[in-house]
Amino acid sequence: MRLLGLIFLIVVIGLVGGFMWLNRQPTVVVDVFGYHLYDISLSMVCFYAFMVGMVFVIIFALVDEIVLRSTIHRLRRENRNLRKELNSLRNMPLEGEK
């Protein structure tokens, strides 16, 4: 499985490199919150946009992971308490039996 992931990564890096090589000449003007950037390669703009997107995906994935882990922790604690209650109910004597 790691081999397939490595092959996929190499293919993606090759495609991104080829895209950047083919689009090295067109330049664009970028306006970021009122700050103008002149004569930036289109491939670099695409690369930076991709990287910013990856950062946002990582942040959202980490937040989701934290929420899931806290939910698992809460459910395990609830399960442990319910098992204790069930065991105490199993060990109670019957009312008709004395």
Image (cartoon, grey):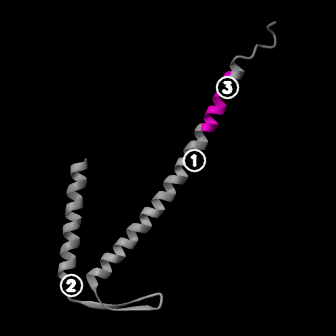
Give the residue at x 25% y 54%: 5
Residue 94: percent from left, percent from top: 77, 13
Residue under label 2: 24
Q: What amino acid type is highlighted by mark number 1?
A: Thr
Q: Which residue is mark 1?
A: 71
Residue closer to the observer: 72 or 37 = 37
Instruction: Check disc 3 and give the amino acid type.
Output: Leu
Contact check, label 1 and label 2, Cβ < 8 Å = no
- Mark found first going from the N terminus, 3 or 2: 2
**81 versus 91 height, above or below:** below
Mark 3 and mark 2: span between their CA atoms?
69 Å
Q: Which residue is mark 3?
A: 86
Q: Amino acid at mark 2?
A: Arg
- Tell me which label, 1 or 2, sits earlier in the chain: 2
**What crowding class fits label 2: few (fewer than 14 Cα within 10 Å), some (14-19), or many (20 or more)?**
few
Instruction: Name the element at disc 2.
Output: loop
Rendering coords of residue 35 (x, y %): 44, 90
Q: Would you say 71 lies left or right of 47 here?
A: right
Report the number of discs: 3
Image location of residue 87, percent across then percent down: 66, 22
Badge 1 element: helix
Magenta span? 77-87
